Amino acid sequence: RNIVVYKPSIPRTTVLFFNQDLQPILSKDNVRKAIAHAINKELVVQDVLNGDGTVVHGPILPGMIGYHEDIAKISLDRQLAKLLLEDEGYVQEDDREFRTDPDFEKEEEEEEEIVDDLTLVLTTVQSAEFIRAAENIATQLATIGVQIEIETVDPEFFFDQIVLPRNYELLLTGVLLSEDTDPYPFWHSSQTGENGLNLAEYTNRNIDTLLEDARALTDNEERAKKYHEFQ
């Protein structure tokens, strides 16, 4: 007897959000680029989902209005990532596991053994899948000299204590999308802070206009053009 296994595609993405307001290190373009160039997304999918997932390179998923395969992709290039960090002053000495943070300031009451490693805190929900993904990302970023401290939060408190007040430096979380393409709730500037789900706190007036115009259109081809430009 033949058995056919169907694997339904769910419009949910797992995203690593940067909070530049809470962590000034992430406000540096080269730092964000370095992190992106250092993470092998295929490896995360294989390790966490046994390969039963698809790597995406933009906010609009395959099959949705506005998706296009020619969107610019960030290459896996750890050598470039290291150079970008060095350009920002984050150097790694031969006897150090992680890079040093030149802006590190030790509190007076802290013990002497506190070191000035380049460290970021990654927050995620207490879920085996997300914790495994966070650990994978931490391991990968260690290869470019960035230390990641993982903070997990009970699902019961995750939204009210972490997401809503934007209480995170790096946030690894799932985003469930509707069948009808509408990136507005996640990328329009009106949705920053406690007003919405713009978890990257991203603001760009040109992007706002594109998302507003796309929402007002009923012609899907015209909407797709707006979303192409948005990406």
Image (cartoon, helix red, strand yellow):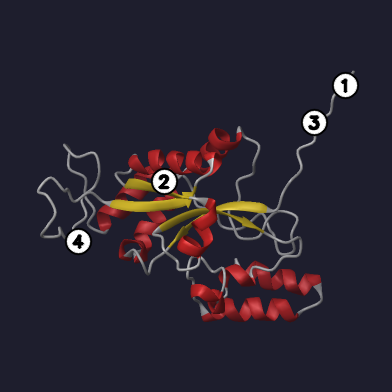
Dot 2: element: helix
Q: Quadrant of the C terminus?
A: bottom right
Disc 4 packing (10 Å; few <14; some 14–19; many ≥20): few
Q: Which mark is drawn over residue 2?
A: 1
- Quick check: 172 above or below 139? below
Earlier residue among tags 3 and 4: 3
Earlier residue among tags 1 and 2: 1
Q: Which residue is mark 4?
A: 103
Of discs 2 and 3, which sits in the foreground? Answer: 3
Dot 4: element: loop
Q: Gap between marks 1 and 2, in whole Å?
A: 42 Å
The three-letter code of the residue at mark 4 reads Asp
Q: Which mark is drawn over residue 38?
A: 2
- Identify which residue is drawn at 76% across, 38% down: 7
Q: Which residue is mark 3?
A: 5
- Identify which residue is drawn at 17% across, 38% down: 94
Earlier residue among tags 1 and 4: 1
Residue 118 in view:
yes
- Identify which residue is drawn at 66% across, 54% down: 69
